[in-house]
Structures are given as structure tokens and as C-alpha cells.
Image: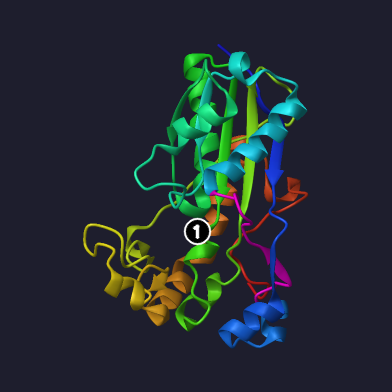
Amino acid sequence: MENKPIGIEAIGTYIPPERHTAEYISERSGTPVDIMKTKIGLKSKAVPAEGDHTVAMGVKAANVAIERAGIDPEKDLDMVIWAGEVYAEHPMQTYGIKFQGDIGAKKAWAFDINQRCGTIIVAMMVAKSMMRTHGYERVLIGSGYRNCDLIDYDNIRTRFMHDLAASGAAVILRNDYPENVMREGSVISDGQFSEYVYVPAGGTKMPITCEAIEKGLHYLDVTDPKKLKEDLDDVSMQNFLKVVDESLQKSGYTREDIDYLGLIRMKRSA
């Protein structure tokens, strides 16, 4: 049986109005303003205002997508996926279920999925597969992010993450929808990088304490910046090209067919 097309019916975004400028970050971090603007590529970034919690921003974005699609979330959504951050309103909360409740998707069921910067790609691949397997008509994927809270501008080891910001995003996928058709994807993960970047305190290895907070161990940190750079330089570009080529091949395209290439976490010189 031929698979029906699965397309993007609507998207929604929410960007908080509050900003940190390159000048502000430069003053806090000691990084020259021209480096912030030209090398890092940041003039300003969104930071959360009061009430802009992680799931809450995803809800704002989802409501935009729902309105654009002209659907009733109570009746028209079959599945909801939370593809946002795990740093959110409360630890150990199932954010997908909270998100589902806040948008009023009573008929749907919900779950969380996470793979840091690759989460939305993985979520869309999972959604597409489940829509074809179970015949779901509509799936809403939502995301929220405010890991900017976890950045200490005084820590030079995390300078490459000083652009982390805040926002919400959502996408509605529809079965048997010939517009904005979702093609194929490809993902690579590499376990050697799992111990380089994390928040030291707050887990089972190092519970959160007053001493940990005083030492700044509740912020993101990099265990070995030099080794991380060396290891990334060895594999990053070839892996980026590999997933692009695999996605194109699975979809029946070549590099010559690409009109727009969207990149994240890649400097201009690359």
C-alpha cells in the first residue's frame, strides 16, 4: 500500500520581548563586542520575561499553530509530543502531558522526547512513523526553551553557548496532506561527547546544595574545552554532510536540489 503524504499543516512560534544585547553580554563576559557580533554572530538574543516558563512558551506557540490550522485541539489532535527542554517548570514532571492539558488536547495522548539540538528532527521522524503505523490524522509537536538561565557569562569555558536564548515553537503534522510534505531524515549520535557538556549539580552524582550553588555548579559547564574542540573537529563536518546526503538519498533528491540550508551551532568560517 502506498504511503499517504504527511505534511506540515501549520507552525507557531513565540519569542519573548526581553533582550540581552551583544553589548550587555560583552560587559558581563569580557568577550569583545566585535567578536560577539562578527564571530559568534549575535547582536541580541531573547531572554524570558515574567511568566515565560519552558512549557508555557511552548503553549503560546502551539496556540498560534492551532489558530492557523483552524482546528479544535480537543477533537482534532490524536497525539502530542513534547520536544522541548527538560529544564522546565518542575523537575520530574512529564511535560508532554502538562503541555497536552494546557492546550486542551483531550482526545490525544502525549509523551516527551529529547535529544538536545536534534530533538525536533527526531520528534518529526517519530511522529511520521507513528502516523503511518497507527493512522493518526494530526500530531502536534511543541517545544519551549530557556537554557539561557543555565549560562554563567563569567565562565569562559561556555563562551560558545553565550547565545543560548528563549523561545517556544510548535508544528502540526497532518496525514494525507499534500502541502509542505515532510521528507526523510537521518540522525547520528556519538557517545564519546556525552560527558563534555552538562550541569554538574542537581543529579544523583551531585545533589543540589548551598555549596554547589555558591560554586556555580548549577550552571552549564564544559569538562575539557580543548579536547571537546579537537574531537568535534575530527567528526563534525563529515557527520553533517552524511546526514544531509542520507536524507536527500532517502527522499529521492541530490544536493543540487537544495534551495535553502538551515544550520544551527555552526560558525561562518565552517
Which residues are drawn in magenta? Answer: 40-53
User: Does residue 182 lie above or below 206 as drawn?
Assistant: above
**Which is nearer the eye, 120 or 204?**
204
The quarter in which the N terminus is drawn is top right
Q: Where on the picture, by quarter, is residue 13?
A: top right
**Image position of 119 (left or right of 206):** right
Colour basis: rainbow
**Image position of 43 (left or right of 145):** right
**Which is nearer the eye, 256 or 57?**
57
User: Does residue 23 lie above or below 169 as drawn?
Assistant: below
**Which is nearer the eye, 237 or 50?**
50
Label 1: state its secondary structure. Answer: helix
Residue at the extreme top? 1
The quarter in which the C terminus is drawn is bottom right
Prevailing secondary structure of the magenta residues = loop
Q: In the image, what residue occupies the spot 46% across and 27% down?
A: 110
Instruction: Check residue 46 for magenta coloring.
Output: yes
Percent x, y of residue 188: 45, 51
User: Does residue 97 lie above or below 116 as drawn?
Assistant: above
Residue occupied by mark 1: 239
| Circle count | 1
Percent x, y of residue 8: 69, 30
Q: In the image, what residue occupies the spot 60% across and 37% down?
A: 59
Percent x, y of residue 165: 61, 61
Q: In the image, what residue occupies the spot 67% across and 40% down?
A: 253
Instruction: Check residue 212 for magenta coloring.
Output: no
Residue 184 visible within the image: yes
